[in-house]
Image: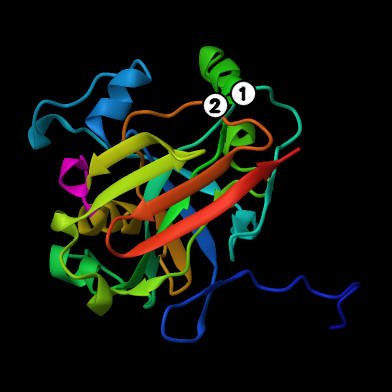
Amino acid sequence: MTDLFPAPPVPRVPVRGGGAFPVRRIFCVGRNFADHAREMGAAAPASKAERGQPVFFHKPADAIVTGGADVPYPPGTRDLHHEVELVAALGHDAPTGELDGPGAQALVIAYGVGLDLTRRDLQGAAKAKGLPWDTGKGFDYSAPLSDLVPVADVGELASRTLTLAINDEVRQHGALTDLIWDVPEIIQELSKLYALKAGDLIFMGTPAGVAALQPGDRFTASLDGVVELQGAIVG
């Protein structure tokens, strides 16, 4: 069968040490830091027993922006927000059947730091009407992402923090120990809903401090001590 037009290129993320990570899907986790859940007006669980189910949504694979490229301010919004996040990259297909914690963790081959950019006004309007908020999250250039760092070079995640500075002013900072659902737990929950494959990225949720971005703003996001992402919002 002949294609009617040339197939678009597969989005790829550079990997420290060489090679590239071809992106299949982008999964995102909502309200995965208690302080952010509270700042968005949601209840935060007091214990693991009260967590309920994690909140998932998607971004298109071609929403990633790599190499520190400029990020265009998106159409349709006057309230673009930043959300700095740990990103886990899966390098293996999930087996059939229920995953345990070590089995889930073994699927991860690399980590990075990214921004879950959000058209907050569109998201808020959809939430108020009980409608899906895809247009608030899954738009073009909505997932700036650093190079990916192999798991072996990252070490213990529990000792790491996330930081985001806008125009050299720190806006967000959070410890990964504060995640409501950690990486293997999120992978276990996702595997109950989707066939996870090599090439999947998981944006793990953001700490408190989300706020608006304007054209001309410069951002520096970091998985502290591991990798950094720099870029700018352009009008």
Going by the numbered disc 2, the residue's amino acid type is: Ala
Please give the name of the residue rendered at 31% of the width and 55% of the height, measured from the top-left corner: 192
Q: Residue at x 22, y 64 (%)?
A: 98
In magenta stretch: residue 178: yes
- The quadrant holding residue 226 is bottom left
For the C terminus, the quadrant is top right
Q: Which residues are magenta?
A: 176-182
The residue under label 2 is: 212
Residue 193 visible somewhere in the drawing: no
Look at mark 1 in the image and give the residue it sits on. 79
Viewed as shown, does residue 19 lie left or right of 32?
right
Measuring from the top left, give residue 217's x and y in whole percent: 60, 37
Would you say 199 lies left or right of 9 here? left
Residue 69 drawn at (x, y percent): 65, 59
Nearer to the camera, 16 or 117: 16
Describe the element under mark 2 as helix, strand or loop: loop
Q: Residue at x 43, y 29 (%)?
A: 210
Report the front residue among 128 and 161: 161
Residue in the picture at 15% in, 63% down:
101
Q: Is residue 197 above or below residue 114?
A: below
In space, the residues marked 1 and 2 are separated at their CA atoms by 6 Å
Q: Are marks 1 and 2 in contact (CB under 8 Å)?
A: yes
Locate residue 228: give its quadrant: bottom left
| Above-or-below relation of 14 to 143 | below
Q: Residues within 10 Å of mark 1 (few under 14, many from 20)?
A: some
